[in-house]
Image (cartoon, rainbow, N blue to C red):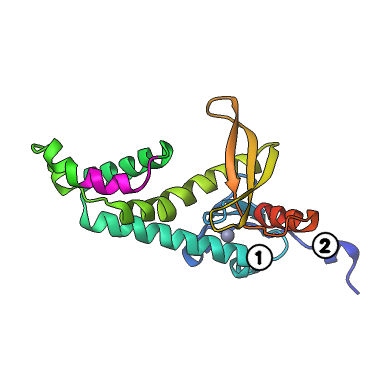
Amino acid sequence: MATPSKMKKYACKFQSEWKQEFQFIQDSSKGKGYVACKFCRTDFSIEHGGRNDIIIHERRAKHKAAAAQHRSQSSIMGHLAKWRPDGVIYAETKMTMLIAASNIPFSFADVYNKSVKNMYPDSEIACQYSNGRTKATQIVKGAIAPELDKEVMELCQNQPFGLMCDESTSRKMDKEFVILARVCDPKTEEVVTKFLHMPVCNIGAAENLFESLNTVLR
Ligand SMILES: [Zn+2]
C-alpha cells in the first residue's frame, strides 16, 4: 500500500505548448497554477486537472458565449479592414462613437455621410468615407459595445463596486431592469457610474429581479 507521502498529488503547471492547441489562453498573472482566458478575461486554476481543466473551461456556456462575441467582433472589424484603409476605418468608428456618446439619433449618420465629401473635397479619407445609419448601428452593437462591456466587467472584477438598479418601461411596454455600477476608475482615480446591463424583466418580483441580477453578474 502506498504511504501518504507517495500518494501526495503534485499541482499541475501551465505548459506553454498548450497555447498552440488552445488559442484563447495565455499566461496568468496569478502564477503557473492558473491560465488566463482571452475571451472571458478571467483566470482559472489548472492545478488539479492541467490540460483537462482547459477543456472543461472551453465547454462552459459562458466561454462559448464569450468566444462567439469575440468572433463576431473580429469579423466586423476584419470586414471593415479588408475594404478600407486605416484612416477611413478610424474616421467611421470615431464618428460613430461621437454619435453614440452625444446621444444623437443614428439618422444623423445618413445626413453626415452625404455631406462629408462636399465638406472636405480635398481629403482622400472623406472621399472614401461611407458610414450610414445601418453600418453605424452595427459598429456600435458588434464592435464598440462588447468592448465597453468587457471594460466595465473587468473594473468590477478587480475591486469593490456598488450597484444601482431600477426598472423602466420601454416603448414596447417591456419592463427593463437597468443595472448601473458605481466603481473607482483607476485611470482617473474617480468614482464613476457605469452602465452594466439592462435585461428585460416584466414581472418585477424580488425573486425575478434577483435572478436577472444573478445572471448578469455570473
Ligand atoms: Zn473562456
Dot in front, 2 or 1: 1
Q: Residue at x 76, y 54 (%)?
A: 210
Residue 108: within the magenta? yes
Q: Residue at x 14, y 42 (%)?
A: 117
Residue 8 badge: 2
Image quadrant of ligand 1?
Answer: bottom right
Query: In the figure, is residue 115 to the left or right of 215?
Result: left
Q: Quadrant of residue 208?
A: bottom right
* Image quadrant occupied by the N terminus: bottom right
Earlier residue among tags 2 and 1: 2
64 relative to 125, above or below: below
Mark 1: secondary structure? helix
**Camera-side residue: 22 or 155?**
155
For label 1, the residue is: 53
Q: Position of residue 67 (x, y in %)?
A: 51, 63
Residue 136, visible in the rendered structure: yes
**Direction left: furthest residue:** 122
Q: Position of residue 89 (x, y in %)?
A: 27, 47
192 relative to 106, above or below: above
Query: In the figure, is residue 146 to the left or right of 12?
Result: left
Most common SS among magenta residues: helix
